[in-house]
Image: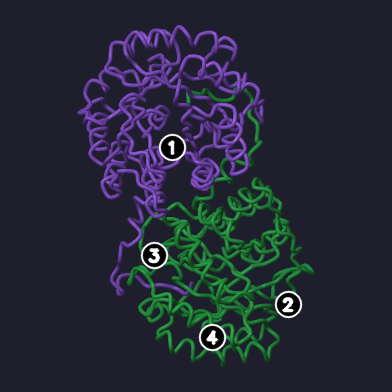
Chain colours: A purple, B green
Amino acid sequence: MSKDASPRSDKWVDIIEVGTRDGLQIEKKLIPAAEKIAILDAMIASGIRLIEVTSFVSPKAVPQLADAAEVLAGIARRDDTYLMALVPNVRGADRAAETSLDGGVLLCSASETHNRKNLNRSIGESIDGFAAIAERLREAGIDRLGAVATAFGCPFEGEIDQANMFRIVRAYAELGVKHLTLGDTTGMATPANVRATVRALKAEFPGLDLCLHLHNTRGVGLANVIVGLEEGVRRFDASVGGLGGCPFAAGATGNICTEDLVYLLQESGYETGIDLCKSIDVALRMERALEKPLVGQVMRAGPRLTLHAADAVPTAAG
Amino acid sequence: MSKDASPRSDKWVDIIEVGTRDGLQIEKKLIPAAEKIAILDAMIASGIRLIEVTSFVSPKAVPQLADAAEVLAGIARRDDTYLMALVPNVRGADRAAETSLDGGVLLCSASETHNRKNLNRSIGESIDGFAAIAERLREAGIDRLGAVATAFGCPFEGEIDQANMFRIVRAYAELGVKHLTLGDTTGMATPANVRATVRALKAEFPGLDLCLHLHNTRGVGLANVIVGLEEGVRRFDASVGGLGGCPFAAGATGNICTEDLVYLLQESGYETGIDLCKSIDVALRMERALEKPLVGQVMRAGPRLTLHAADAVPTAAG
């Protein structure tokens, strides 16, 4: 990331906000571009520096993100703001090239079935297509970032073949990609496979900055963050209010929640540059925009030392 | 615990189910004793061995638990079933003595304000009263277990004075208590204070079996479990379906969820003796009994390798 001005102390953790992309993409209620921009501006004001704003997918496939260029153009950047978007194909790269995007994320699933379903091509075809997308982004002065979807398991195939992941990552590395996101697309990451995967990738590709894109589908998202931190990962995707979901489980939650992650990191002695209270305000605003309750916990309970009057509420033992 | 037949491999973790106590105590909808018993029997059939079934609090204060004796009498025990209940005072011990309870849990908060509000006495008065409760339980052949509420912070006072916790634990130790539960009553435990507190207590009281009673009020319950495991804790309270709540935050969740904890442990190479699918069935049954959705995640998404047909649901990139 060229504008990535992260202080690189061992206690600094980058949070990449993906709520307006991974969160909104499954929401039926269309949020007007102006409201998205206001929310993104509020995220930046809360201290968020890195945002995966949108995706240059087909507007027909994901109408919610048809306003990608308009939203990117409307954001009031700060000097350290770094805006990213998914760029799944050359057509997307062409659209991205017309914007002020900082980083374009190339994508491929580690599962053949998921990649076919998501991008309508084989893993090999996706890999063969990377160069053209990357070249189009390079010409436009946009950084090339890489992501592997279903990195910890596939909802169709089950366990993934690690050889597939290595093929994809090697292709990214050959294109000079420095930032690699491992996507826990449907919440199949566990402490054991997060640890094993991070170790294997660090051993093989020591120059890559790893980012974990964890979902909380099975409730263990933040437990996986702890393991990632222990393995030296200092970059995590998260979604405002825990926005998002899992297409395979009605009622299951989506990405790990930004404010809950900020809270966890802050209480664990890490720095994020993000103001927790402002972050909660952003989540409450997103909730109002979507007119439905989000699943974030800290946005309900407040920061840890939120004190209550002793006569406020009756307690019961325990 | 006298009937505690846990295999003591380093990979064995005891889960104590507290849903019918800590979970139900804040539910307004009264569940009939017969339904509670059916759910408790299903828990036992799922492999749960240790259950904090109820509390011998004043039936006036907590009508939901007025049926404590009836429920305990109705449970179909297996040989390794161990039934526990909170016993906050001598009157409660008198009632418990008439039942087949295995373990009675004494309780005191590490916060003066919380203890006064919860038990209507000072920490000193609670400590002075332990002996009489313990003696009554001993006469009835019931094990004496100990718990410290607000062990990681108090919603009224903020940080607790660790000296208070040590006073309480010393009093338990002098009474021969072996099992000590640290209660994260309103979800103020963090990786940092879980690690520090467990280390401090283990250094001072190496003979105690520590149990963590974690709430997920701020979303970090299972992250705290990871830290507890790293510090050698092998006993955790959890609540079916994540049942429970926080009286200070509408919409905030309560105890960590049993099935999600079973999932996390199983996927991390630990053994619990609990069948995840049966455990999910219990959560679904509790949900039907309460006629409202519970917050458990694995009960929605299913076990990790729940596979889907590739034509089941449209996906979107990411």
Image spot of residue A121 (x, y percent):
56, 11
Q: Quadrant of residue B311?
A: top right
Q: Label 1, label 2: how many angstroms apart (C-alpha)? A: 45 Å
Image spot of residue B313 (x, y percent):
55, 25
Q: Quadrant of residue B123?
A: bottom left
Q: Label 4, label 2: how many angstroms apart (C-alpha)? A: 21 Å
On the same chain: label 1 and label 3?
no
Q: Which residue is mark 1?
A: A236
Judge depth for marks 1 and 2 and give the one in front. Answer: 1
**Residue type of the residue flagged with mark 3:** Pro
Instruction: Identify the disc placed on residue A190.
Output: none
**Residue type of the residue flagged with mark 2:** Ser
Q: Label 1, label 3: how many angstroms apart (C-alpha)? A: 32 Å
Image spot of residue A135 (x, y percent):
41, 8
Q: Label 3, label 4: how many angstroms apart (C-alpha)? A: 29 Å
Q: What's the chain of the residue with tag 1?
A: A
Q: What's the chain of the residue with tag 4?
A: B
- Helix, strand, or loop for circle 1? strand
Mark 2 is surrounded, within 10 Å at the Cα level, by few (under 14), some (14 to 19) or many (20 or more) other residues, namely few
Mark 1 is surrounded, within 10 Å at the Cα level, by few (under 14), some (14 to 19) or many (20 or more) other residues, namely many
Q: Are marks 3 and 4 in contact (CB under 8 Å)?
A: no
Residue B46 in view in this figure: no
Instruction: Identify the disc placed on residue B247.
Output: 3
- Helix, strand, or loop for circle 4? helix
Instruction: Identify the disc placed on residue B2.
Output: 2
Q: Which residue is mark 4?
A: B171
Of B227 and B16, the residue lying toward us: B227
Among the two numbered marks 3 and 2 on one chain, the one whose residue lies closer to the N terminus: 2
Q: What's the chain of the residue with tag 3?
A: B
**Residue type of the residue flagged with mark 1:** Phe
